[in-house]
Amino acid sequence: MLIRNAPDIKSSEITDKSLYLSRRKFLLAGSASLASLAAGAAPAWLSGVDEAYAGTKLPGVQKSRLSTGEPLNSFKDITTYNNFYEFGTDKDDPAQYAKTLVTRPWTVAVEGEVKRPKIYGIDELMKLSPLEERIYRLRCVEAWSMVIPWVGFPLSALIKRVEPTSKAKYVEFLTLHDPKQMPGQRRGVLEWPYVEGLRMDEAAHPLAILAVGLYGEVLPNQNGAPLRLVVPWKYGFKSIKSIVKIRFVENQPATSWMKANPSEYGFYSNVNPDVDHPRWSQARERRIPEFTKRKTLMFNGYGDQVAQLYSGMDLRKYI
Amino acid sequence: MSFEFKIKNSQFKILKAAAFAACSIPLALLIYNGYTDGLGVNPIETITRSTGKWTLIFLLITLGVTPLRRITGWQWLIKFRRMLGLYAFFCALLHFTTYIWLDQFFDLMEIAKDIPKRPFITVGFASFVLLIPLAVTSTSGMVRRLGKRWQQLHRLIYLIAIGGVIHYLWLVKADTRKPLIYGAILGALLGYRLLAKWRVGEFFARRFALSPAAKEE
Ligand code: HEM
């Protein structure tokens, strides 16, 4: 039946990741970790020599007090229902087409108003700070939501490392722009590369993380590998994927969705049940795979932690 | 361009049964996928979108009957038109039902607020409401009783289809490709009628004296 029994799906599908992995990659990942075991060396993904395939286990991931205890969405939910327009605008496009994305080697340029600008290799970034599991709610602007066990580290760890100057008021993020790897970029659905941004204090908030993994393993391509932002109190599109550039700037960045439709998408885009998108009511949401809809919570339920960032601001105006 | 292709009554019956079966495939697939967990991660969205898409497709196929009949001269095509139109209505009914049931959960207050508030819903709803009198007057008895007014009434389908395309165009977030493709097809179907009405063909035939009939006139 189409009305699925949520707990059933979760327990069975969490372990069923081989479904997602192509057989070849599965075998490769398996042999790579066997080889590293035999050599007594660091896992292949850490050495940066071998490719870190999605599905490779991430070692030493710590639990976090900031995680929610709500039931998780299945690995299948999270990896087959994605908005990632770089690979097509249908929800199942990213799972089909993101295989062309090459995530190793990968560099992230951190630049702008900082004392220590640097081009980081992805493996170096992953060792910047201990990896934590962060189980967050994700609320899409299209009025559906999931609960996702990300693996990552606080964005604030990177911010501290590069030492922003007093001029740095905002952080701007850019996705890779390469139509060969990202076939969706061959059409001008949005202005490429995808751009997102946060105010400095938002970026430094402990809930904001850079994610490199999902379900304890290397992030699948369709979820924004190898490095993505996760800002759980904002609509999903703020959590930019496959980041290649992080820029500290003085002025508020113009984000892709603001440019596409300024009357519908604002810079802040905090989850807010009282301010409707012109085309969708934001008062309720469908928690996948539930049948009925539930009430949407202010700041996606993270109000206790983040509301003070916006004190004195009219959130009907600053959407 | 027309050439003889007449069919016997018995052949027509078989053809009609086949067409009926073919029209049922999208719905049968939807039900099959529903029972086999094949509707993806968000089944309700899949159902809403699929029924909406097939409403529009059946509307366009219905609008294609007359041009195809004129071009080919296969008069019997007209006999499929009612069935195709009713399929469009049936899909629209399912589409609307998924909205009031699976999207709004029969919250009538919420629905009453939602329809005027969101332009894409307003237009879709108007199209759906306009389809109802067409479905009701689709019987042979009604066709006879209404006479010339039946034709006038059923011209509403142009408006309904235009509304359907606008509804689609207004609900997409950024990627307008698919609604524009449907819009282009609708444009061709309606454009054909305008050209036929203005007798553009005859005009050219006369002007360039292409056909002997035109010369004689
Ligand atoms: C003749 C009437 C209608 C036609 C031709 C039509 C057609 C469509 C089409 C083509 C889609 C998009 C499918 C896709 O994304 O692939 C759609 C989606 C939708 N329609 Fe309709 N529709 C009609 C009437 C209605 C009515 C009466 C309502 C509700 C009052 C409605 C509500 C919706 C909703 C909620 C969606 C989904 C939007 C989303 O997923 O964001 N439609 N419709």
Image (cartoon, coloured by chain):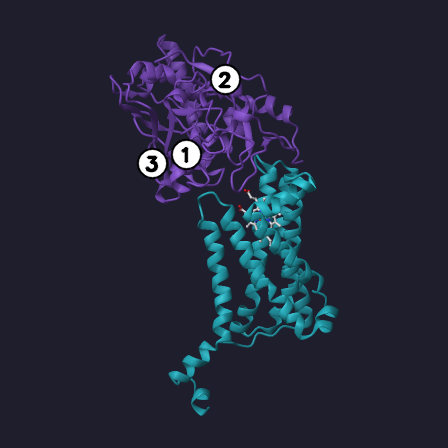
Which residue reaches farthest front?
A: A312
**What element does badge 1 sit on?**
helix
Which chain contains the residue that carries disc 2? A
Q: Earlier in the sequence, mark 3 or mark 1?
A: 1
Front disc: 2 or 3: 2
Q: Earlier in the sequence, mark 2 or mark 3?
A: 3
Tag 1: amino acid = Ala
Nearer to me, B73 or A246: A246
Q: Are marks 1 and 2 on the same chain?
A: yes
Residue at figure coordinates x 65%, y 55% from the top left: B129
Q: How far separated are the C-alphas under marks 2 and 3?
A: 31 Å
Which chain contains the residue that carries disc 3? A
Front disc: 3 or 1: 3
Q: Is residue A20 above or below residue A279?
A: above
Q: Mark number for residue A98?
A: 1
Residue A298 lies, in percent from the top left, at 55, 26
**What element does badge 2 sit on?**
helix
Residue at figure coordinates x 59%, y 57% from the top left: B58
Pointer 3 residue: A193
Q: Which chain is purple?
A: A
Asked if one can make out residue B210 in the rendered structure from this viewpoint, the answer is no
Quadrant hosting residue A189: top left
Q: Is residue A192 above or below residue A268?
A: below
Q: Mark number for residue A185?
A: none
Quadrant hosting residue B140: bottom right
Q: Earlier in the sequence, mark 1 or mark 2?
A: 1
Residue B171 lies, in percent from the top left, at 52, 46
Which chain contains the residue that carries disc 1? A
